[in-house]
Structure formats: structure tokens, C-alpha cells
Amino acid sequence: MVVNSFCAGIFFKAFLLAVTSFIAWFYQALQPPPPAICGTPSGAPVTAPRIQLGDGRFLAYKEAGVSKESAKYKIVIVHAFGRSRLDLLPVSQVNLHTLWTKMLPLNGSLKVA
């Protein structure tokens, strides 16, 4: 009687260990991979012109219109969430050149570790 309850206890503990191990493996399998930071060897290449801020973050931008030297008016566009530097105002390039205007939309800055 004591031997049977001892074996049943060992099998129960082994079963709990197997179930716990499976749950741990399943949890790890569901976790997303770590993010790949742009510009690092494992990340995507940096394709946008950008400047580095004093605190180490980068600010990407896209220029539109006439050159910086010949522009009479310079418009800096700071976008809200859900938009990007690629979403320019609906102004044609002809109008920008006619008005001698340069537009500079900025992207949100990200900290690069």
C-alpha cells in the first residue's frame, strides 16, 4: 500500500513537471522577437535623411519645394500620431516653386540604444 502511494506520488510530480514545462515552452513560443533597431547590423538600413539630436535620438525629415538657399518661405510641418513625414500637405510642386516655398515635414524622434 505504501509503495503504491509512493509511486503514484512520483508519477503525479513527474506529470506536473511535464505540464509546467510545456506551459513554459508554449509561453516562450508566443513571445515576439526583440525589435530590430534601424541602422544596426541586425536591423533595417536607414534610408531617410536624419539628424541626431543632443540626447541621442534621431529626427528624420523629407524636403519638398525649392532649395534651402533660394526659398523665400520655409514651412516646418510637425505631424501628429498616425501620420508620417511622407504625408505632405496637398500642395503641388509647381505651386511650391511658384511661391518659392520649401516644406520640411519631420518624423517623430526615436532613441537608439
Image (cartoon, helix red, strand yellow):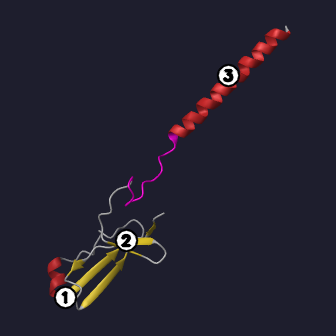
User: Which residue appears at 16% of the width and 84% of the height?
Assistant: 97
User: Which residue appears at 56% of the width and 38% of the height?
Assistant: 27
Q: Is residue 22 left or right of residue 65?
A: right
Q: CA distance from mark 2 to mark 1?
A: 23 Å
Q: What is the x, y in percent for residue 44?
A: 35, 56
State which quadrant residue 76 falls in.
bottom left
Considering only order in the chain, which callout, 3 or 2, is on the residue closer to the N terminus? Answer: 3
Packing grade of label 3 (10 A; few <14, some 14-19, many >=20) is few
The relative height of residue 99 versus residue 80 in the rendered view (above or below) is below
The relative height of residue 38 versus residue 6 in the rendered view (above or below) is below
State the count of labels: 3
Q: CA distance from mark 2 to mark 3?
A: 53 Å
Asked if labels 3 and 2 touch by Cβ distance under 8 angstroms, the answer is: no
Assign the magenta stretch its main secondary structure.
loop
Image: magenta residue range: 30-42
Q: SS of the residue at dot 3?
A: helix
Considering only order in the chain, which callout, 1 or 3, is on the residue closer to the N terminus? Answer: 3
Looking at the picture, tell me which residue is in the foreground, 69 or 100: 69
Residue extending farthest to the bottom is 72
The relative height of residue 60 versus residue 103 in the rendered view (above or below) is above
Q: Which residue, given by chain and number where applicable, does mark 3 sit on?
A: 15
Q: Which residue, given by chain and number where applicable, does mark 1 sit on?
A: 100
Q: What amino acid is labelled 1 in the image?
A: Trp
Residue extending farthest to the front is 41
Looking at the picture, tell me which residue is in the foreground, 7 or 82: 7
User: Which residue appears at 23% of the width and 92% of the height?
Assistant: 72
Quadrant occupied by the N terminus: top right
Q: Which residue, given by chain and number where applicable, does mark 2 sit on?
A: 107
